[in-house]
Image (cartoon, grey):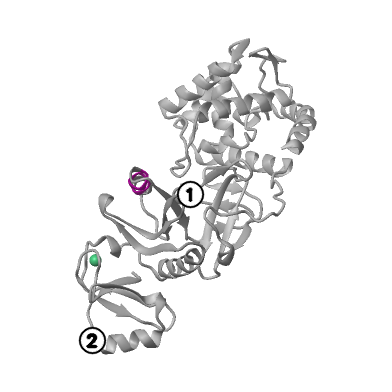
Amino acid sequence: MLTALLNQQVITTIHYSREELRRLRREGVSFVCPHCSSILTMRIGSRNTPHFAHISHSDCELVRGETPQHLLSKQLLYGRVSSLYESVSLEHYIKEIKQVADIFVKTDTADIAIEIQCSTIPISEVVRRSNGYHREGITPFWILTQSLKSKKLLNLTTFQQAFIRYSPSLDYFLLQFLPDRGIFHLYTRLLPVSSTAFMSAAPIIIPVAEFTLPPVIPNVPILPPYSLSKWNDFRTKWIYNKIHYNKARTDVFLREVYGEGDTFLYLPLFIGLPVIPHGIHIRNHEVEWQYYLWKDCLKKDSLFSLESVSNALNRRLTKGHIEFRSFPLQKSDKVIKKIAGGYLSVLEEVHVLRKINDTFQLTEPWSCPDHFSAFEQHKHDFFPKWKHILKKL
Ligand SMILES: [Zn+2]
């Protein structure tokens, strides 16, 4: 923690030099925790941000997650935010909900609690703390400060995915703070290719000195990172992995495919299309949830509506065959309908469906290629249409 009480006055380490702090410590003054009133020690290393620590193990609210990364993040962000607003406090205790905001900002229009999250905590805890703030009319602003695995794809744990939010100009995006470099990385236009891997545009870099609340996105062109060949490679890889790692007899999804008499390896390419942007809400692969829609709805009925497809998706969710990702920082309205509608319009674009007033109709009856050469023919016929839609995305 960066704040303590000294003679009942708040003292913040980052407002003093290391030398001044050492002098204070030599004087033998006692620092007290503003929250639990226990005695604190002051730690002044050569590299870490000088800070206070509880002497004995404590269940004080302020003890949690105090890593060097967390302290440095607090210091940098406090420095920036207090240059923008007058009323900014560190480690601000909100009595009514017994929560401590890392940084608390009062602007003319809002009270904002900045939560800097370095360690992995249960997502339910993120929800609980956010709800607490909302109850008090405070806007929570969560900042993820974990390192991310990113090579060709961005690999995100379930916890890291919980920080994904949506904006019409960025699609689904993730903001990450890198305290050691004093910058933010903003990953935009996230498109999942598996439950943990995402395609994304190269991250936009926002130096902490340009950070605002809410963040203003620098005016750089954001190129969609999608390409037909990449998407198809990942789709094929997912299918082969599924065969390789799952026993057909025990895998719920594969059992349904085989039970229907369809050939999993040769499913039509219009099963497993990217549904941009809202398809990201579903954790299962596109092949899985889109196949369910075909089985439950599209291949059975000659005419169907957006509503019947949404209902089919909803039933699979209720049964647990399809699972949503948890995006607690993002209010999501009518997601099921948006996803179902998104998929139907892609199918319309590739001429698998035609729309007649408010209903949809297959342009050709369902058929699943059942051997290699039939599948090659299907690929040959389908790729030109697919290229056309992916170019437009
Ligand atoms: Zn305490």
Q: Amino acid at mark 2?
A: Gly
Residue 163 is tagged as 1
Q: Which span is picked out in magenta?
A: 129-134
Magenta highlight on residue 362: no
Q: Is residue 59 left or right of residue 105?
A: left
Residue 250 in which image quadrant = top left
Vertical order, 229 against 307 (above or below)? below
- The residue indicated by pointer 2 is 28
Residue 218 image position (x, y, % from top left): 65, 56
Q: Amino acid at mark 1?
A: Phe
Mark 2 crowdedness (10 Å alpha carbons): few <14, some 14-19, many ≥20: few
Residue 344 image position (x, y, % from top left): 64, 24
Question: Residues under labels 1 and 2: Cα distance?
Answer: 43 Å
Residue 17 in which image quadrant = bottom left
Please tell me how many numbered marks the rendered image carries: 2
Q: Is residue 235 left or right of residue 309?
A: right
Dominant secondary structure (helix, strand or loop) of the stretch shown in magenta: helix
Q: Secondary structure at mark 2?
A: loop
